Amino acid sequence: MSRTEKTSPYLVKLWDGTLRRVAEHDHRFGDCDLPQTLAEHRARCNSRCRWELRYDGTHICCCQLCRAQTWVRNDLRGERNRARIRLGEALKEYRGSGDWED
């Protein structure tokens, strides 16, 4: 399996910062047992306190069925357009500074 970012497992994405996470605590039956590392998280799958996804608009599924949805294509197109505009503005600033003529 490829080691690209889009194919990494959900749990790895939570721990490496690709996805935002938030701590969910349940202290009804004891002290906090929130895992502090990925290895600890995998070792204790039945902990009361856990890390959960905080959705921020990042698409976590890479399958063609999800990527083919109209709203996903529109989001990606919009992101490409915004990136192209930012790059164009940066180039205009760079060319206007006179540094490129050296």
Image (tube, rainbow, N blue to C red):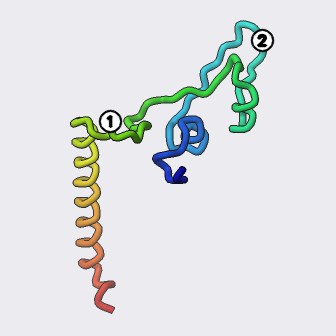
Closer-to-camera residue (79/10): 10
Closer-to-camera residue (39/81): 39
User: What is the quadrant of residue 31 in the picture?
Assistant: top right
Q: Identify the residue shown where x is 75% and y is 22%.
A: 33
Closer-to-camera residue (79/96): 79
CA neighbours of label 1 inside 10 A, class few (<14), some (14 to 19), many (20+): few
Q: Identify the residue shown where x is 27% and y is 39%.
A: 68
Q: Identify the residue shown where x is 61% and y is 27%.
A: 51
Closer-to-camera residue (86/43): 43
**What amino acid is at disc 2?**
Gly
Side of 53 where 25 appears, left or right: right
Q: Which mark is residue 65?
A: 1
Side of 79 where 24 appears, left or right: right
First in sequence: mark 1 vs mark 2: 2
The secondary structure type at the circle numbered 2 is: loop
Relative to 41, say whether 15 is above or below.
below
> Label 1, label 2: how many angstroms apart (C-alpha)?
43 Å
Depth check, mark 1 against mark 2: the one in front is 1
Q: Quickly name the residue at label 2.
A: 30
Q: From this viewpoint, which residue is outermost toward the right? A: 30
